[in-house]
Amino acid sequence: MKNEQLSELAKITIRQAQESDVSMLLRLSEQLGYQNELDEFANRYHRVTEDPESIIIVAEGADGSITGFLHCGILPELIVPFRVHIFALVVDEGARSRGYGEELVKAAEDWAKERGCDAITVRSRVDREGAHRFYNRLGFGRVKEQTYFRKSLES
């Protein structure tokens, strides 16, 4: 790792998301291609943060600006041991490959261990090859390929 990258890592602050972060979380989620209205996004933020088995973690740069976030939660499944699943991870386009994502994943792993989970999982779209390389570098291994089905419950 280069000296400038080590210096930047020393300036990263990882913390739990706060109400005042919602608009920045929305802006970052748009970089993944998700378009949401602020009110709807804020409502989902509140629902997620009220769940004790879910957490939103943010990474701040030296200037205090949010450079990324990770949302994860415990998946309580009957047929396999409970594990933590990363539902969203995004680092600002201008701050990628500087250690923010890795620090967010480390924080999620610590959170998972504190809750007695022995694994962490993530899904990534097939066309996000950069994300696949990132997760492989952090020790994630491909488990299976599957087809993802969805049914709308709107009338």
Image: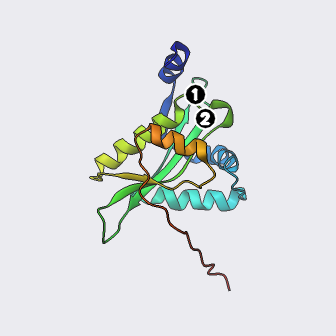
Specify few, some or many for label 2: CA neighbours under 10 Å numbering under 14, 14-19, or 20 or more.
many
Residue 64 percent location from the top left of the image: 59, 28
Q: Measured along the vertical axis of the image, is residue 138 above or below residue 26?
A: above
The quadrant of the rendering that contains the C terminus is bottom right
Q: Residue furthest top?
A: 3
- Say which label, 1 or 2, has the lower sequence index: 1
24 to the left or right of 87: right
**Viewer can see residue 54:** no
Say how many tags the image has.
Answer: 2
- Find disc 1 in the rendering and name its residue: 61
- Identify the residue at horizontal 72%, vertical 57% (top origin): 35
- Find disc 2 in the rendering and name its residue: 67
Relative depth, front residue between 5 and 28: 5
Residue type at mark 1 is: Gly
- Identify the residue at horizontal 46%, vertical 53% (top origin): 72
Cα separation, mark 1 vs mark 2, equals 6 Å
**Viewer can see residue 112:** yes
| The image quarter in which residue 125 lies | bottom right
Residue type at mark 2 is: Thr
3 to the left or right of 76: right
Q: Residue furthest bottom?
A: 155
Q: Secondary structure at mark 1?
A: loop
| The image quarter in which residue 51 lies | bottom left
Residue 1 percent location from the top left of the image: 48, 19
- Identify the residue at horizontal 48%, vertical 35% (top origin): 102
Residue 44 percent location from the top left of the image: 58, 61
Q: Secondary structure at mark 2?
A: strand
Relative depth, front residue between 120 and 38: 120
102 to the left or right of 90: left
Question: What's the coloring here?
Answer: rainbow
